[in-house]
Image (tube, rainbow, N blue to C red):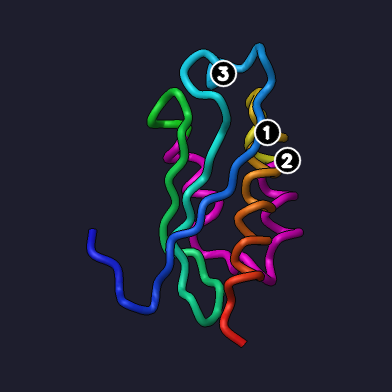
Amino acid sequence: MIYPKNTIYITGTAKVAANDPISAIYDMFFVGIILEKDNGNIVDVTCNMVRDVTSDFIKSILVGYNLENDIEIIVEEIKERFLGIAQKAVIAAVKDARNKYLMAKPN
């Protein structure tokens, strides 16, 4: 997929629990979010889950939301729909990505 020039890629990271399968492969969880630079709309997502279906599910939750304005809705949807061990890490990584976006956002 080719992304328009008005998009940026931001990563968010979080620690995972020792009993999470992610920890057997990776040191930490990350989410990569491609969004429109000027308005924060999420257009694509990747993350380092163990199974592709899990990454696709996280993507289905996030795409279409606005990283700046919809954070409370995003967190609630993750809590309601993603009941995996890494739920807290997913939320923390998305919030970390949001903070990085807010620091880099053009005024």
Query: Is 23 in the magenta?
Result: no
Out of 80 and 44, give the one closest to the viewer.
44
Judge from the rendering whether residue 101 lies leftward or rightward of residue 99; answer left or right.
left
Identity of the residue drawn at 50% across and 58% down: 10
Give, as a single range, the part of the protein colored magenta: 55-79
Please name the amino acid that badge 3 sits on: Ser
Query: Is 76 in the magenta?
Result: yes
* Residue that mark 1 sits on: 87
Lower sequence index among marks 2 and 3: 3
> Circles 1 and 2: CB distance less than 8 Å?
yes
Query: Where residue 38 sits: x, y (%)?
Result: 51, 82
Q: Mark 3: few, some, or many residues within 10 Å (few <14, many ≥20)?
A: some
Query: Where residue 35 sits: x, y (%)?
Result: 47, 67
Please name the amino acid that badge 1 sits on: Gln
Please determine whether, in this image, residue 48 is positioned above or below residue 78.
above
* Residue that mark 2 sits on: 79
What is the secondary structure assignment of the residue under circle 1?
helix
Judge from the rendering whether residue 19 lies leftward or rightward of residue 72; answer left or right.
left
Q: Quadrant of residue 2?
A: bottom left
Q: Quadrant of residue 91?
A: top right
* Residue that mark 3 sits on: 23
Out of 64 and 27, give the one closest to the viewer.
27
Judge from the rendering whether residue 70 lies leftward or rightward of residue 106; answer left or right.
right
State the separation of the CA atoms marked 1 and 2.
Answer: 7 Å
State the separation of the CA atoms marked 2 and 3.
Answer: 21 Å
Which disc, if any, is residue 14? none
